[in-house]
Amino acid sequence: MDHVAVTRRTALQDGAIAARILGNALSTLADEMATTVFRTAHSAVVRDAMDFSAALCAPSGETIAQAVTIPLQLGSIPNAMRTLLDAPFGKLLLTVVALGLAAFGIFSFCRARFPERT
């Protein structure tokens, strides 16, 4: 076998493995989002019937990962994202929400890493 062919095949396999790992990581993240919604829900509909959906969307509004919940609502997420992106302040609103979620993630990490000592 040619060294270049072996290297090319190895690179393709590595790319496929990396894509699978990234896909699984995004699916796990969406499942964690759904678990958080379920654990913190005050609504009996969400808690008992698990009547909600969770998904991660690309900047264009396309769904890139979805949680294992009721998939009926997931079909409307790309349309809702597109509508929001087309709104006058939609991109700004999504940016503010994303920054808030990132800040909450950092806060949660710090709180878990450095618990208060009483």
Image (cartoon, rainbow, N blue to C red):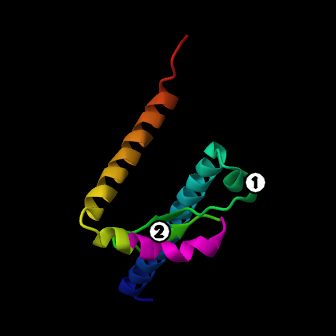
Q: Secondary structure at mark 1?
A: helix
Q: Quadrant of residue 15?
A: bottom left
First to last magenta residue range: 69-81
Residue in front for this viewpoint, 13 or 114: 114
Task: Where is residue 82? Give x, y as percent.
Answer: 36, 74
Task: Where is residue 56? Give x, y as percent.
Answer: 47, 64
Disc 1 marks which residue?
A: 48
Q: Is residue 22 shown to the viewer in this render?
A: yes
Whether residue 30 sits left or right of residue 4 in the image: it is right
At x 47% / y 68%, what residue is drawn? 18
Toward the top, the furthest residue is 118
The quadrant of the image that shows the N terminus is bottom left
Whether residue 98 sits left or right of residue 117 in the image: it is left
**Residues marked 2 and 1 touching at CB (< 8 Å):** no
Q: Quadrant of residue 66?
A: bottom right
Q: Is residue 74 above or below residue 39?
A: below
Is most of the magenta stretch helix, strand or loop? helix
Instruction: Tell me the distance, in whole angstroms, between the alpha carbons under discs 2 and 1.
Output: 37 Å
Disc 2 marks which residue?
A: 18
Q: Is residue 102 above or below residue 26?
A: above
Q: Is residue 112 above or below residue 37?
A: above
Residue in front for this viewpoint, 32 or 49: 49
Q: Reply yes or no: does residue 75 show up in magenta.
A: yes
Residue in front for this viewpoint, 15 or 34: 34
Q: Secondary structure at mark 2?
A: helix
At x 40% / y 38%, what residue is drawn? 106
- Amino acid at the residue labelled 1: Asp
Whether residue 78 sits left or right of residue 67 in the image: it is left
At x 36% / y 73%, what residue is drawn? 83
Which one is earlier in the sequence, the residue at label 2 or at label 1?
2
